[in-house]
Image (cartoon, rainbow, N blue to C red):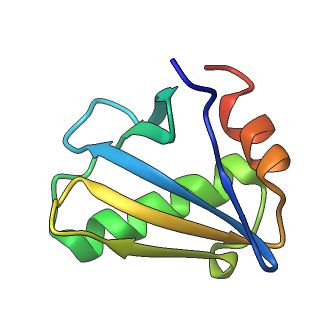
C-alpha cells in the first residue's frame, strides 16, 4: 500500500474523501492510498451531506467552517475537500490522531 497523501495547494491542502452516509456516528474510519473514509450520520441530499461533512471536519481540525470547501463528483459518496490555511501534515495529524 502506498503512503496516504494530502495534496499541498497554494494556501492550503486538498484531500479526497469517500463517505458512508446513514452511519450511527460521524467519524474518520480509515485512510488508504490517497483517500480518507468518513462515516456521516446524515442520509440527506448532497447539500445536507456537504454541510455535515464541513461541520465535522471543522470540528476535527479546530478551524472555522469557512476555511473548508467541498466539491462533489458524479459519485454521491465522493468529495474533494480543500482546507485553507493548513498544511497536509497538520490535517493528517488532526484527522488521524485516533484512527
Q: Is residue 7 left or right of residue 54?
A: right
Residue 84 location, x and y as percent? 74, 74
Residue reaching furthest to the front: 2
User: Residue at left 42%, top 50%?
Assistant: 17
80 or 24: which is nearer to us?
80
Residue for point 41% across, 39% down: 38
Q: Is residue 45 left or right of residue 73?
A: left
Q: Residue at x 36, y 69 (%)?
A: 50
> In this rendering, would 78 be left or right of 65?
left
Point out residue 58 in the picture as x, y percentages from the top left corner: 65, 60
Q: Nearer the viewer, residue 88 or 56?
A: 88
Look at the picture and state if 69 lies above or below 90.
below
Residue 16, compared with residue 26, is above or below; it is below
User: Where is residue 96 drawn, in percent x and y?
Assistant: 67, 29
Could you tell me which residue is drawn at 34 percent across and 45 percent down?
18
**Residue 88 at x, y percent in the picture:** 77, 52
| Image height of 86 relative to 91, above or below | below
Amino acid at each position: 500500500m502506498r503512503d496516504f497523501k494530502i495534496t499541498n495547494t497554494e494556501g492550503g491542502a486538498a484531500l479526497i474523501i469517500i463517505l458512508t452516509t446513514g452511519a450511527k456516528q460521524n467519524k474518520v474510519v480509515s485512510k488508504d492510498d490517497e483517500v480518507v473514509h468518513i462515516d456521516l450520520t446524515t442520509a440527506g441530499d448532497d447539500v445536507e451531506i456537504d454541510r455535515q461533512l464541513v461541520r465535522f471536519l471543522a470540528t476535527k481540525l479546530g478551524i472555522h467552517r469557512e476555511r473548508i470547501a467541498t466539491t462533489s463528483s458524479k459519485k454521491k459518496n465522493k468529495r474533494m475537500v480543500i482546507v485553507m490555511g493548513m498544511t497536509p501534515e497538520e490535517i493528517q495529524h488532526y484527522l488521524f490522531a485516533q484512527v
